[in-house]
Image (tube, rainbow, N blue to C red):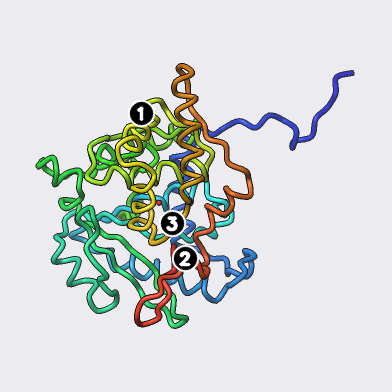
């Protein structure tokens, strides 16, 4: 008599790119219109969680303008699909990245000046904004006018949201989903290898030219370690090329610049780079770095802010570290 297996022991099928696209549309809707209370979802700090989520919704609603179309981009989309809390809609991203079509940088500044603080321009042409919460935390937003995003401004070509996914460094950054679709219309969604990368667990170079290659390398290593995604040979070549030129010291500086903290120390980075080099020289195929589960969970720890992720500015404000 053939042995029967429980559902837990059956081989789990990975979702396809088409299924992931449909899932992302659903999860963005659920996330923005969350009906559950944070305590129902088992959150350890429901008061802070609720305040952060309300701030995110408030800012996105400010962009619901007939003359504009706004798109959610960046790590929030990955977190909604494969973050540790994605199934329960408890996602609190490190920061919220938004691209706005039809608006200028000056118009966005005017819109946000009364409710958000402009901390600085971003490296890639956007606005780095924060929302102060009564608790002392700040919720972080990076907002770009589409024409100011680095890919279009550097190429000097007409901006198009359909082409935006082709301008990101990594395949798993190459997605944009509409925040406020017209009534009765599905959310517009544009991607270039994003869902395939998620479905296959592979990190690849999407668009190599970039003014900050060491930030790209640092992000790629952190994300590959956290998600346990394999690297393509193109990604491995990019990492090995730039680390041979700038060394690990450049990656330490890049982390401080991008994350506001050092998430991976030199010893850990060096071991990962050795592992990548060894597998790369061994022959063709995907490359994977070995990271213990406990360490992977540490790399997910972006929220809530802890003593090692708080920005201790002169005013004593705490920055909620919401790639």
| Quadrant in which residue 210 is drawn | top left
Q: Is residue 156 above or below residue 147?
A: above
Left or right: where 20 falls relative to 5:
left
Circles 1 and 2: CB atoms closer than 8 Å: no
The residue at 42%/49% (across/down) is 77
Q: Position of residue 47 (x, y in %)?
A: 55, 76
Q: Position of residue 101 (x, y in %)?
A: 20, 53
Circles 2 and 3: CB atoms closer than 8 Å: no
Q: Position of residue 173 (x, y in %)?
A: 36, 43
Q: Earlier in the sequence, mark 2 or mark 3?
A: 3
- Viewer-proximal residue among 102 and 218: 218
Secondary structure under badge 2? loop
Query: What is the crowding at mark 2: few (fewer than 14 residues within 10 Å), some, or many (at least 20)?
Result: many
Circle 1 sits on which residue?
237
Q: CA distance from mark 1 to mark 2?
A: 31 Å
Secondary structure under badge 1? helix
Q: Is residue 101 visible?
A: yes
- Viewer-proximal residue among 69 and 163: 163
Q: CA distance from mark 2 to mark 3?
A: 9 Å
Looking at the rendered image, the quarter that the N terminus falls into is: top right
The residue at 29%/77% (across/down) is 115
Circle 3 sits on which residue?
262
The residue at 32%/51% (across/down) is 178
């Amino acid at each position: 008599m053939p042995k029967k297996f429980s559902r837990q022991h059956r081989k789990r099928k990975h979702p396809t790119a088409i299924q992931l696209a449909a899932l992302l549309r659903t999860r963005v809707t659920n996330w923005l219109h969350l009906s559950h209370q944070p305590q129902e979802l088992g959150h350890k700090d429901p008061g802070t969680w609720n305040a952060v989520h309300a701030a995110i919704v408030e800012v996105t609603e400010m962009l619901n303008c007939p003359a504009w179309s706004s798109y959610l981009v960046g790590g929030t989309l990955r977190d909604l699909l494969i973050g540790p809390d994605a199934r329960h809609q408890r996602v609190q991203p490190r920061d919220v990245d938004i691209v706005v079509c039809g608006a200028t940088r000056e118009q966005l500044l005017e819109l946000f000046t009364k409710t958000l603080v402009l901390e600085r321009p971003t490296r890639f042409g956007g606005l780095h904004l924060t929302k102060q919460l009564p608790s002392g935390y700040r919720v972080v937003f990076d907002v770009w006018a589409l024409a100011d995003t680095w890919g279009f401004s550097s190429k000097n070509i007409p901006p198009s949201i359909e082409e935006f996914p082709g301008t990101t460094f990594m395949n798993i950054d190459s997605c944009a989903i509409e925040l406020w679709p017209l009534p009765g219309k599905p959310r517009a969604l544009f991607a270039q290898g994003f869902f395939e990368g998620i479905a296959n667990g592979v990190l690849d170079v999407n668009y190599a030219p970039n003014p900050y290659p060491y930030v790209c390398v640092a992000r790629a290593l952190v994300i590959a370690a956290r998600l346990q995604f394999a690297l393509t040979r193109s990604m491995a070549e990019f990492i090995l090329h730039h680390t041979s030129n700038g060394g690990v010291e450049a990656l330490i500086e890049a982390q401080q610049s991008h994350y506001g903290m050092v998430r991976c120390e030199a010893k850990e980075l060096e071991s990962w780079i050795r592992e990548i080099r060894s597998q790369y020289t061994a022959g063709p195929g995907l490359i994977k770095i070995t990271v213990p589960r406990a360490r992977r969970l540490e790399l997910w720890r972006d929220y809530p802010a802890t003593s090692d992720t708080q920005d201790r500015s002169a005013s004593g404000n705490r920055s909620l570290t919401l790639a």
